[in-house]
Image: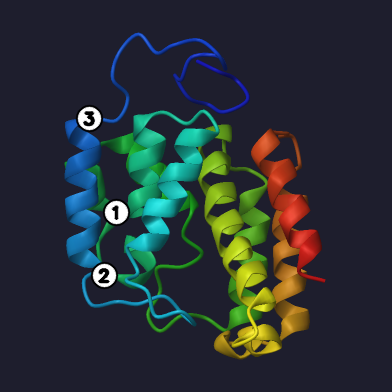
Amino acid sequence: MNPSTGSDAPPAGQAPTRPVWGARFESAFLFASGRHFGQIRKGNGSPYITHPLAVAAIVGEFGGDEEQAIAALLHDLLEDCGVTEAEIESRFGTRVSRIVLDCTDTTDSPKPPWRERKEAYLAGLVHTPADSRLVITADKLHNAESIVRDLARKSVGDKVWTRFRVDRAQELWYFRAVCDALGQGWEHELLDELRRVVALLG
């Protein structure tokens, strides 16, 4: 197992000895796309499933294994789709379920106040294992990249910040705090990329 990623992926430049994106990944995609059906992304209105797909792609590009990619596809199901941890575990196993839970800042309904929820999540984030941190970082990176792209669009610009529950200052605080928490006891090229993109937000 690669200690920096917590995955079974081979070292960079070394061809895998077996398929790493097979029938289980396909099953997870179908499951996630069904649960996210009808949901859209804030701002650009694209089908929501485009976000988990992008996160899974980032995970794969940065050395994640099939189970981490599956967790990436499923990472918003507990919080946004009413899927239970037990259901994910029964379908995809204990490790996938644990990574998805690590990506989730609350399963409470209604959700606690935003700042309270984020501070509690950050406190737990410093204790998450490396395989979860890779998926979490990929999620935050895709979110940050989406904001950067929209900031550059003439049709959106600074209006991008109005799509969130809190103001720009609070969003920037959270992105920076996530970078700090992820960096406690873990370093990875993906985290470097997240830090670079977050710096572009302002």
Image check: 179 left or right of 69? right
Residue 131 in picture, x, y percent from top left: 51, 34
- Above/below status of 89 relative to 51: above
Q: Which amino acid lies under the numbered mark 2 shown in the image of this protein?
A: Gly
Whether label 2 touches label 3, CB < 8 Å = no
Cα gap from disc 3 to disc 1, whole angstroms: 22 Å
Tell me which residue sits at (73%, 34%) in the image.
187
Question: Which residue is label 2 attached to?
Answer: 82
Cα gap from disc 2 to disc 3, whole angstroms: 26 Å
Tell me which residue sits at (45%, 35%) in the image.
60
| Secondary-structure class at tag 3 | loop
Question: Which residue is label 1 attached to?
Answer: 85
Q: Which amino acid lies under the numbered mark 1 shown in the image of this protein?
A: Glu
Q: On the rendered image, what quadrant is the C terminus found in?
A: bottom right
Cα gap from disc 1 to disc 2, whole angstroms: 10 Å
Q: Residues within 10 Å of mark 2 (few under 14, many from 20)?
A: few
Tell me which residue sits at (71%, 68%) in the image.
174
| Secondary-structure class at tag 2 | loop
Question: Which residue is label 3 attached to?
Answer: 22
